[in-house]
Amino acid sequence: MWFYVARRFNLFVLTLGILFLLVFLMHKALPGDPLTNLSGITSPTFNQLELLDEQYQLSGSVFNQYLGFVTERLSGNFGLSLTSAQPILDEIIQRLPATIELCIYAMIIALSVGIPLGVLASFRYKKVTDWLIVSMSLICYSIPIFWLGVIGIMFLGLEFQLLPVAGRLNLLFQVEPVTGFTLIDIMLSDLTSKSQAFKDAFFHLIMPTITLALFPVTVVIRITRTAMLEELNTNHIKAAEARGISPLIIVLHHALPNAMKPVLAQVSLQLSTLLTSAMVTEVIFSWPGIGTWLMSAIYQRDFPVISAGILICAGLIIIISIVSDLIAIAATTKRRGMHHGKN
Amino acid sequence: MKKLSKLSAKLVLKTALFSAVLFQLGCSPSTNDNTQREEGLVYCSEGDPSVFNPQLTTIGTTIDATSNQLYNRLVEYNPRLGKLEPALAKSWTIANDGRTYTFSLRDDVVFHQTKFFKPSRKFNANDVAFSFNRIINPTHPFHDVSGGNYPFFNSIDLANLIDKIEVVNPQTITFHLNTRDSSFLANLATDFAVILSQEYGDYLLSVNQPQLIDIKPVGTGPFILESHYKDNYIRYKSNVHYWGGAPQIKHLVYDITPKSTNRIAKIMTGDCDVSALPQSSELDVIRRNIDLELQIQTGLNVAYWAFNNESPPFDRLVIRQALAHAINKRAIVKAVYYGSATMAKTVLPPLSWAYHRQLPLYEYNPRKARKMLADAGFPNGFEMTLWAAPAQRIYNPNAVKMAELIQGQLAEIGVKVKVISYGWGVFINKLNEYQYDSVLLGWTADNADPDNFFRPILSCAALMSGNNRVNWCKPQFDQLLNAASGQTKQSQRMEFYRKAQQMLYDEVPLVPIAHALRFQVRDRSVGGMSLNPYGGISFAKSYRISKGNK
Amino acid sequence: MARTSHIYQDEIIPSPQQQIWRNFSKSPVAMLGLWVFAVFIFISIFAPLLAPYPLGYQHTSALLMPPSWHPEGHVAFFFGTDDLGRDILSNLIYGTRTTFGASLLVTFIALFFGCVIGIFSGMSHGLKSSVLNHILDATLAIPSLLLAIVFVAISGPGMTNVMLAVGISLTPQFMRATHNAVHHELSKEYVTATKLDGANKSQIFINSILPNILDALVIQITLAISVAIIDIATLGFLKLGVQSPRSEWGAMLSEGLDLIFLAPWNVAFPGLMIFTSVLSINMIGNGLQRALKERID
């Protein structure tokens, strides 16, 4: 197992290296002053020029420049934003929790709705319920997320005015950002009208989260259904059935855990799609996360922000996928260890 | 297995029920205190202010955010009565030669107390001198802070107009001018002529942070800046010691929402109470909504198509004239403004007393345009760029759409147009490089004086300060403007303004397109919000009409 | 299907392709998807002949006309017009070329490159294979949106950038699928048999492996087309793609957002086109998966 972990770690470092290389090469191709694009300082003074030269190894070979770039970014120096002249790291810290909040809630919904539906479909294989669930998930899988969001805004928000359509919270509620997650921060804060603020934040969350969760739900349904169908046909399940063990225990104890493996594997594969969808959702619902930040940076040609945004987004995807891989390995080995003795 | 499928079905149903219950919770009338909403107001703004000091800019978004909220001026213009009123100055006298203005100041005005500054004295004449010397005196310690460019004041050449500013005593200040200028008082009433705190300036110098004067502002106005999250929101709290009476709104929040459909959506769902710049396409929806009120005001503004007069072939008069004939202004007013604008003959709107009624119009005639181009040596047309910013302005709800329309119209005479667009902040910066062939811009008046329509955008001084985007400088034009300012009688001034408009027609450095109606949307529970024909928005007098339940 | 002219009734076992087709055509859903897909292909090829008006033509007298079935609508503008007077139907038809056509093009280019690389890496062993595998996994992490952002940052918005970004992000899937399939096949016994017979690498490949990996590839292709359509439309929606006057479904939707109060058909129809095209390809993919599974069963 450790060999496997080492291989994964090796892959992780290599992937990160390639990512940095890609961004570094992008910097070489950007229009404008390369120093400004790297640091965000528009007219550097002489002292600043010296410091920048040292940090980014500008007088060295290309390889040295690459190393300088990597060390600077890894140490947290992403430079200043051209539009706001603030350190980019601060802006990232301010905005990232909003995106992560959206993604986590969406995945929770996707799993808690998708898994039961997938299990249900596998039980009613080839019957009406199964056909219904599969068709619905096929349709939902084909809806472009931005269309769904816009239709939602049109009907739920504007026509019937049931739900708010933009932002995280009515701005009259001033909430101190402790964790960056609105619902938690409201509970932690000392507002006078906490429950009102909580309700307000909750309603603001509904449409973006459901919009974002729709695509993952269909994927989870499909994978769960396939995995469960395979599981239910295996010999050891059939044997358990024959032994008369109650169906509930069969599902929860025997079938589902094995079926979860491919589901979780899919989750990590879906990460890049999830992040892209999150960015689009943020743009539609004016959610103040990394997505809106990056998109406005593109329209304003704020190159330091664009480069930082790509590093953070792709970096996150890589890190989370490696972590989920490792968790999957650990879980598998543990189970293998349980059932078959020493590996 | 049947039992199990029933189980999972139940699980799905239970989750649905749970969410429905939560939903119901939200729909029940809230009996909790509503004070947060009663004392607060959210304004949906179309953009982020670039800086918190109106001296440094002419951009409407910044003015709306800062000028009437954080600061005051010596005098203010009352649009209803049509005359100047006292503000920080109680009264004023003008000497017979028209070159000496003496102001008697209020003695009960205090500056803001913020997290980082506590004033130790009230407002006095030193603050007035500090604020204006910053603009006109290059040796003033704050002159170069934040760029050193004062676009409005540079375009009216304030530095050469004022000879010196004399502090007679703490309550009296005198401006000595070099020449007569009948627009001087009106210019002091514009949103740009705000009064800063000299004490704050001294303090910032002592901690070596002079740039904070424009980032963490201190003024005398009805609201104090609490926090600013760029491109997201601005939080103000009321100034309880305001000399004009503490505002009834305790918390004022600017929700920065660049897209117009989002602003309307927010005001319809209650996330905003007042909204800026509704697009003309949304007016019907607003009118149908009984909770919203639409305020309309005739516009003292103009949207124009500016040529870069130094860039060939636009340095040739005949080319500019040909292009002026190729524009279908009626179609533009219909498509971009949905009819809520009037076609423009010149930069002055018809409302202005100096409007030249007999001025001819460059009529829409594509065949003539094509022939003129052919005669000028371009039988197959040419290629050009047209820059448009994707941001709403009072004078233009959708510059990119207008650009596309013009692109289509010019295609008919063989001219290929490439539309170039950047985010507003980048857009303004890039304009300074003068790389464009033409650009869609406009101007909203800051006061009722016609000088305000010409000088800030067409004078040679404006070319220096960067507001003159036509890249055109004609000393004879400037002379006409100066002559008009030098007169006191309206009929005499009118003659010079007529000649100026005639020159603009003859030279056609820009093509005026339309004068837009001004709109504002507010929730009916908000009172005290009047729509100013010029200048920025003010929340000093706004309040909430409390209903039982909202 | 016995040939009656023969004396002996031979048992004709349909070829694998025929089997798949039979299974596929049994499902009405899959066939519907295939028909719709064919219609889209037809539209993208013959767009200039089908569209009632030229691309981007502004009818200044017919702004914001509702669709023809609306009382104020007009048959001449079947789906209505936008706020510059451009006919929506014509723009949608031309947009088929941009969104649908481009996604097909991009998929097949990604298929070509992905397969070539995947086959080489699958046929190789040891270090080479491991290195290629690593690079593969690395590129999988970067979604098409981020790649598109990179290209747009460098050279501004435009269709080439979008196609490049989507193409590059699709290639790893084909690489991985081909690599795995080839690797899988290589370990099978019939390949060893062929090797023992004395065939060289390319002979093994063309005759033995290639026919057997087509199955896995076909599913990948349908998946990739649907991803490509959505990606291109999303990038167009975010205004990173074509500029006016060319049309693209996602960009049309984004422009229609400003008119959502006055003229919601500007948003509904482009979205419907995207949805229909993606649904059709997904139905085909679903049908193919079923057909393949049934053949194996």
Image (tube, rainbow, N blue to C red):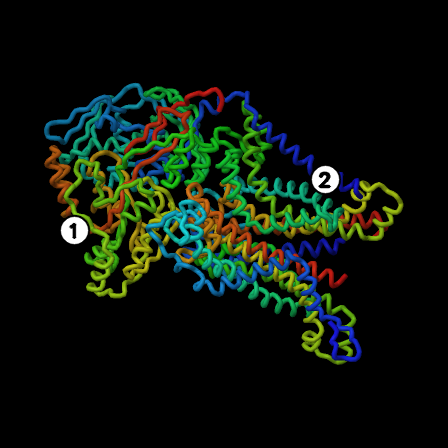
Q: Nearer the viewer, residue B264 or A97?
A: B264
Q: Is residue C236 left or right of residue C19?
A: left
Is residue A176 visible to the viewer in this orientation of the structure? yes
Instruction: Tell me residue C139's x, y (percent).
Output: 59, 58
- Looking at the image, is mark 2 or mark 1 earlier in the sequence? 2
Is the N terminus of chain B in the top left, top right, bottom left or bottom right quadrant? top right
Examine the rendered structure and indicate whether residue C198 appears above or below residue A146. Answer: below
Instruction: Tell me residue B27's x, y (percent).
Output: 56, 28
Q: Is residue A190 left or right of residue C82?
A: right
Instruction: Determine the secondary structure under disc 2.
Output: helix
Q: Is residue A338 left or right of residue B111?
A: right
Instruction: Tell me residue B436's x, y (percent).
Output: 31, 54
Say which amino acid is labelled 2: Ala
As measured in the structure, the alpha-carbon distance from the residue carrying label 2 to the one carrying label 1 is 79 Å
Instruction: Tell me residue C161's x, y (percent).
Output: 48, 59
Examine the rendered structure and indicate whether residue B417 appears above or below residue A256. Answer: below
Examine the rendered structure and indicate whether residue C33 appears above or below residue B21. Answer: below
Examine the rendered structure and indicate whether residue B258 appears above or below residue B83. Answer: below
Say few, some or many: other residues with alpha carbon within 10 Å of mark 2 (under 14 / 14 to 19 / 20 or more).
Answer: some
Instruction: Determine the secondary structure under disc 1.
Output: helix
Q: Nearer the viewer, residue A229 or C180?
A: A229
Please report contact status of discs 2 and 1: CB closer than 8 Å, yes or no. no
Q: Nearer the viewer, residue B387 or A157?
A: A157
Say few, some or many: other residues with alpha carbon within 10 Å of mark 1 (under 14 / 14 to 19 / 20 or more).
Answer: few
What residue lies at 45% left-to-right and 39% top-to-bottom? B262
Q: Which residue is mark 1?
A: B506
Q: Which residue is mark 2?
A: B9
Say which amino acid is labelled 1: Asp
